[in-house]
Image: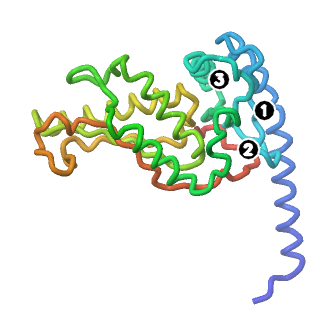
Amino acid sequence: MRIPPLILAGAAACGALAFASLTAHGQPLIAALEARTAQAAAAAGGAGVAAQFRTANGWLTRHPVLTGGRTLAPTQRSRVAAAVAAVPGVGGVQWAPDPARRQDSAAPSGGAMHCQRDVDGILKTRTIRFAEASAALDPVSEGLLDEVAAALRPCAGSIIAITGHTDAQGLEDANVALSLDRARTVREALVRRGIARSDLRARGLGSATPVDGLEADDPANRRIEFSVVSPVSLRPTLIDTPGAG
């Protein structure tokens, strides 16, 4: 069935009007966010850090990329990212890749697989640790999470599952709840390190999936695992909906 030219012209006109409306309303919103995030970054010790609310194609977005601050320590960068993310209206926040820190990975082919391999390698002989029977992160794991965040950063835009596991000791309902709380703790730690919250999914499986070769009640089953489950390219948008993020 052929669509009459008049209908096609009307649809095109409606699209143009929608684009103009979003642009007109989006630009003042983004301008306000740029001003507020600059103040928040400076107050957190990130003088010179800028939040870019436009994609590489020039589309508006509420999920900014932070630039500048290359001389800041990782903990300071985390504080700056957290301060920007806390500004009302801001969605997920991430730091722009630092070429000086990626000299060995100039070709980002196989992005999701590359991130998965790197994180698996980091956690092969080390474990993210928590206080006993608690979701409170052990301070000794802060440096380990810095490494995990650095490994995941090149895969911005992918969906990253954070899965908590426990052993089979105690009641399973409590184990599932604890494993989920620990996964959420790790998610928040990664957000503070500049990984976009919208990329992260936390879940807890309790003791349902023990490590191969271990008995279900072995304490070595207590662990956090990461899976890059749905790699997608960052797509330009006119502007994200106000309630998103």
Query: Looking at the picture, how far across and down is residue 35, in whole percent?
Result: 79, 21
Q: Is residue 148 left or right of residue 225?
A: right
Cα distance between the residues tagged 1 and 2: 9 Å
Cα distance between the residues tagged 2 and 3: 18 Å
Q: Amino acid at mark 3?
A: Val
Farthest front residue in view: 104
Residue drawn at x 36%, y 35% is 183
Q: Is residue 46 left or right of residue 189?
A: right
Q: Which residue is mark 1?
A: 30
Q: Is residue 56 left or right of residue 187?
A: right
Front: mark 2 or 3:
3
User: Which secondary structure, mark 2?
Assistant: loop
Q: Which residue is mark 2?
A: 239
Q: Which residue is mark 3?
A: 84
Residue drawn at x 34%, y 40% is 124
In the rendered view, tell whether residue 68 sits above or below residue 236: above
Q: Amino acid at mark 2?
A: Ile
Query: Looking at the picture, how far across and down is residue 29, in whole percent?
Result: 78, 32
Query: Looking at the picture, how far across and down is residue 243, in whole percent?
Result: 60, 38
Quadrant into which the N terminus falls? bottom right
Query: Disc 1 or 2, which lies upstream in sequence?
Result: 1
Query: Looking at the picture, how far across and down is residue 245, in whole percent?
Result: 58, 38
Labels 1 & 2 near each other (Cβ < 8 A): yes
Residue drawn at x 66%, y 51% is 107
Front: mark 1 or 3:
3
Query: Disc 1 or 3, which lies upstream in sequence?
Result: 1
In the rendered view, tell whether residue 118 sits above or below residue 3: above
Examine the image and state in which quarter residue 187 appears: top left
User: Which secondary structure, mark 1?
Assistant: helix
Q: Is there any visible trace of residue 64 in the rendered image?
A: no
